[in-house]
Amino acid sequence: MRKVIECVPNFSTSDPKVVEAILSEIRKIEEAYILDYTFDDYYNRLVISFVGNEKSVLAAALNASMKAIELIDMKKHKGQHPRFGAVDVVPFIPIQNTTIQDCIELAKKFGKALAEKCSVPVYLYGEAASKPERSDLDWIRKGEYEKLSEVMKSPERKPDFGPTSPHPTAGATITGARKIMVGFNVNLNTADLETTKKIARALHGKKGGLAYVKAMAAKIPEKGITQIGMSLSDFERTPLHRVFELIEIEAKRYNVQIIGSEFCGMVPIQALIDVAKYYLKIDELDKNRILEIAVEKALKKKSELSG
């Protein structure tokens, strides 16, 4: 049975030439397949989603990360998204015929290899975390890149792999294993960042909002609007429609309206099914009722019987 693992590395760049150089390193690896990538000036961040088997995903993640470390100078980097280094975070996610434990081992192999090859401090997070507090990205990223040298002086901030001080241009890297996550951004018809921060705070799980939700506010200068950028670490327990409804409620307090939304990266079909069931009030809807999935299953079954 074929194993499929997803990797969603986040790099601190929006330079098109650097983006292409990083993507090229993934494309070189046989059996590594890019599903999606996004980058923009306001977050100044590149997010790539690719899949493969354990061997190809590891090779692609390492090659892309080494190229990013070669080309990105964090001393010149500015962006609205929290970041830790040139290669900010590299999560591994089980998709098919694999487990979270497989991804934990893969993250450890990646972290050890990157630290050895590039002399970059590497921290393990999520399910791969070496200590409970390190499961949280916010805890690891405390102070962000600008305070990395100071923060790393504390004994409890010693990295899991590599040197105990930042790389001179690449900072530090975080890697780990996690479940499928939904990146969901909502645009608001206001340029007032402080208002958007208040709405984001009401959503953020650790600030009194919804469980499994992290939310931040960002400006989109070219459009004169603001955006709430979110990550939903468990979309089954906190579904998209619940997040969307709360945003609408909070936005009304400030006479603000939602004018659009987008996914950052890939979205699991179950998340969309949940939204359809809620807003269309569909009693019975699951993956088996989706035309494309039903066709794929039928063709696969016929192929197995004839083979």
Image (tube, helix red, strand yellow):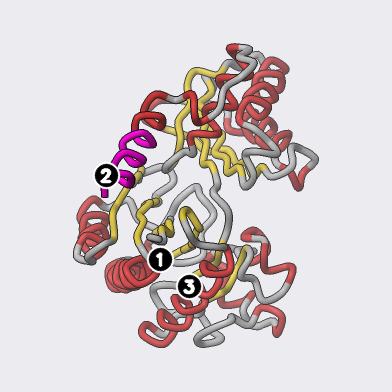
CA gap between label 3 and label 1 equals 20 Å
* Badge 2 or badge 1: first in the primary sequence: 1
> CA gap, disc 3 to disc 2?
36 Å
Whether residue 58 is visible to the viewer of this picture, yes or no, is: yes
Question: Under tag 2, what secondary structure?
Answer: helix
Magenta highlight: main SS: helix
In the rendered structure, which amino acid carries the disc numbered 2?
Answer: Ser
- Secondary structure found at label 3: helix
- Image quarter for residue 11? bottom left
For the point 58% across and 53% down, which residue is it? 179
Q: Residues within 10 Å of mark 3 (few under 14, many from 20)?
A: many
Give the number of the disc on residue 86: 1
Instruction: Give the residues in magenta.
Output: 296-307
Q: Position of residue 159 (x, y in %)?
A: 59, 80
- Quarter location, residue 66: bottom left
Question: Which of the two marks, 3 or 2, is nearer to us in this view?
Answer: 2
Q: Which mark is residue 106?
A: 3
Q: Is residue 304 magenta?
A: yes
In the image as oriented, which residue stretches furthest toward the front?
306
Residue 231 place in picture, x, y as percent: 58, 44
Name the side, left or right, on which 138 lies relative to 191. Answer: right
Evaluate if marks 2 and 1 touch, with contact meaning CB atoms under 8 Å apart. no
